Image (cartoon, helix red, strand yellow):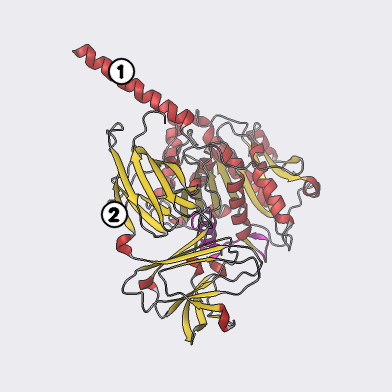
Amino acid sequence: MKKAIIYGFYVAALGLLLTGLRELLFGFEENRCSMTYMFEYPEYRRVQLPRRVARQYPAYGLYLYGEGLYAQETQNLKLSGAPVLFLPGNAGSYKQARSLGSVALRKAEGLDGGIHLNVFTIDFNEELVALYGGSLSRQTHFLHESIKVILQLYKNHPDPPSSVVLVGHSMGGVIARALFSLPRFNPRLVSLILTQASPHQAPVLSLDPFILNFYSKVRRRWSTRAVDLRNVTVLSVGGGYRDYQVRSGLTTLTCPVDDHNKMAVVVTAVPRTWVSTDHLSIVWCKELVLATVRAFFDLIDPETGQFTKDTEKRTSVLNHHFIHHPVRLPAEQISTPVIFSGFLEAWSEVNTLRLFYSAPKEVQVQYFLFALSSRRKAYTHFYCRNSNLEMSSWLFGCTQMNGSVCEQAVDLSLRTELLPAYKVLTMKLSELFGISHLVVDASNLNTRQFIVECEWQREESLTIPVPVPHVLSFGLTVSDVTINSSRLLHTLQLQHFHQVYQAFKITVSSQCKVTKERLPNIYRLKVPWFQEDSFVTAGIPSVTEISGMLHTSRKDNTSSALLQLHAAPNCQYKVISHKALLPT
């Protein structure tokens, strides 16, 4: 009997091991990142270090990235751009900076005023710092010396930079934060740190006391003595489930919870990216590199050509590009009332519960009015979405009517959320004060065809509770929900789904009677306690499988993971959650 129990334990352990290996090798999504290409031959100009630094760190080096004409112009290191310093990670090469540097060069070519980035990169001799922590302190001190050398290169510039932006991959991001634990380091030398797949919470492998002591010192500096670090902006980006070397739960930041200048996000939730990356591709993934470069250029002060010193602006811009993308930067918000001027024929009042509008391929001015007075008692929300509508301002709250025409309104478009296939905006009616109508601007000014769909919604009918399989159900428990509603948005509350050890599959089947002129389905796994949302785009009809997994566990009992179905009207959706221990 005892032997049978032991054998049974071994069989169960082997089964779990094989299941894990299958998930590791075959369970991840395909690599959907676009490759970043160099348009000219990359060059790395070595920066001469002070003799003392060169003798003390003979294996390390500092380089300036360049291509073509820019590489020739910077041969003598007379620089005028905004400095960015790339830090490679464990066994990483300084040449990994080429994706960031090349895209930044191409971006600068299309801008006026000579605004550009100077991308530097450090050669850490490809040391295995994730396996041996003895080199971490040496790399941190060399980083300090490199920053001082970089700033010295701008001493003759009329508006010299006072700080350097750091981009750290893997352990390079940990070293960037460790910089502030040095006793003689001036925190003002670094105002912004962006880390990629960096294990901030703990080392992936704790193989020696050096790495444990290193992490302890960094954690203590950023959590208990962090008052002077509140002006330092930090953004940590995790790679998602394709990164099996550094799980995204380790990329969260150990900082005071009330410090909103520190942000962490998984790359699947980054607007206009929406893909998972493995540990190396996060450096060259074009979608993420573009988001990074756009953010950097939006952070440059056009007057000085250097990165802004405004902490609030840094946080706002990074939130815009990496967390919540309302199409327009918050600084571009229209604070003055909007005055409409259009013919009476351009205005149409919508008296039905839903609007479907397909714009013709011709220039046309079109406004839709939705009266609030008759809807406030029966409905709580207004949901609207559009595809290919290029205008950043498209939904307004009317404050002054003249007959059936809105003369004056406030812009509500800043609340727009960008999804993979369309822009979405959900308004809570109780928050709309002094507004009589909602106005949707569906004008076609460039003959580009698009679709607009809007509807009124009730809060009590928005969310459907769905139990998820228990962790020990072994595939015996299946949850099945059928949705026949005609709404555009369905929200499923995944009950008791809040721990990282929970894993299951969600299958969504859609069937529609009419498929012509329908926007695609967008399925969003929304995690309220961390920026780790994931998106799936599905056609109509379709059968789509979604992985129900979490990067971080819930820290409170007030929120639940949600599955949002941005769906097509008058369709049937069947949602099944089940364990998938065996290949399907």
Q: Quadrant of residue 145?
A: top right
Question: Foreground: 576 or 3?
Answer: 576
Query: Residue 313's spot in the image, x, y percent?
Result: 54, 63
Query: Of residues 470 and 461, which is closer to you in this image?
Result: 461
Magenta segment range?
302-329
Going by the picture, which residue comes out furthest to the front? 513
Q: How many marks?
A: 2
| Helix, strand or loop status at disc 2 | loop
- Indicate the position of residue 514 as horizontal and vertical percent values: 48, 55
Looking at the image, which residue sits at the far left?
A: 1
Q: Is residue 267 visible?
A: yes
Residue annotated with mark 2: 558
Q: Left of 85 or right of it: where is 515?
A: left
Can you say which quadrant of the picture contains the N terminus? top left
Residue that lies at the very extreme toward the bottom in this rendered image:
402
Q: For the residue marked with disc 1, what is the amino acid?
A: Tyr
Label 2, label 1: how many angstroms apart (C-alpha)?
A: 39 Å
* Label 1 crowd (10 A; few <14 / some 14-19 / many >=20): few
**Rendered-image quadrant of the C terminus:** top left
* Membership of 284 in magenta stretch: no
Residue 75 vertical placement versus 320 (above, below): above
Q: Position of residue 434 (x, y in %)?
A: 41, 81
Q: Which residue is mark 1?
A: 10
Identify the element where label 1 is drawn.
helix
| Disc ID at residue 160 | none
Label 2 or label 1, whichever comes before in sequence order: 1
> Is 82 or 149 nearer to us in this picture?
82
Give amino acid for label 2.
Thr
Q: Is residue 320 magenta?
A: yes
